[in-house]
Amino acid sequence: MHKIITILGLVIVILGIILLAIFPSIFYKSAKEVNIENYRDGEKISVYGVITDIAYLKIFNITQITLDGSLKVYAPGKITSWHEGDEVYVEIEKNVTLKIGNNELAIWVTSPSNIHSVSEIRNYLYTIIISGVIVGLIGVLVRK
């Protein structure tokens, strides 16, 4: 029985480390990689990136969030819970595409409830890894 507990602990640790290494890129698209030509108006995608600029535009009552210095996302209202430097993942929707000559400009929108912390998920993964270590140690100690 102790071998099973030890192996289970090891499997949990390995799984946690793998998930930590591939998160968030395995689940979400990098904000730097978003190409507006690949998405239709109304299409939703999930992206991740670091907030490089956040500004409240009072005249429109919206907050403009810039991810990785390249992707601008607009959310209604004033957002005070996120700041520059926060690493987040966000579900965004391509609202409209404006064509000006040969250039295209996409307007991406989200809601404040669709913005989540990457660090928080990483903390959960660290907790899984620590839990696996504890389970493994219990298996080793039961053996003795």
Image (tube, grey):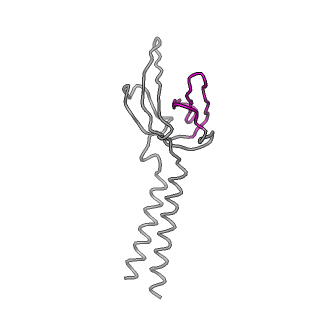
Residue 130 placement (x, y as % from top left): 52, 67
Position of residue 110 measured from the top left corner of the image (x, y, whole percent): 47, 34
Q: Position of residue 114 (x, y in %)?
A: 47, 40
Q: In screen coordinates, is 58 left or right of 111?
A: right
The N terminus sits in image quarter: bottom left
**The stretch drawn in magenta includes residue 4:** no
- The answer to if 75 sits in the magenta stretch is yes
How many numbered discs, if any?
0
Residue 98 vs residue 111, the one in the foreground = 111
- Residue at the spot x=43%, y=39% of the render? 46
Q: Residue drawn at (45%, 58%), measured in percent from left and top?
A: 18
Q: Is residue 120 above or below residue 88?
A: below
Give residue 9's quadrant in the image: bottom left
Identified at 48% across, 35% down, the residue is 111
View extreme (bottom): residue: 144
| The magenta segment | 50-79
- In the rendered image, the vertical position of residue 104 relative to residue 85, given as above or below: above
Compared to residue 143, the image places residue 97 above or below, namely above
Where residue 108 appears, x then y in whole percent? 47, 28
Above or below for 89 versus 96: below
Q: Quadrant of residue 19?
A: bottom left
- For residue 2, which quarter of the picture? bottom left
Residue at left offset 50%, top offset 73%? 134
**Magenta stretch: dominant secondary structure:** strand
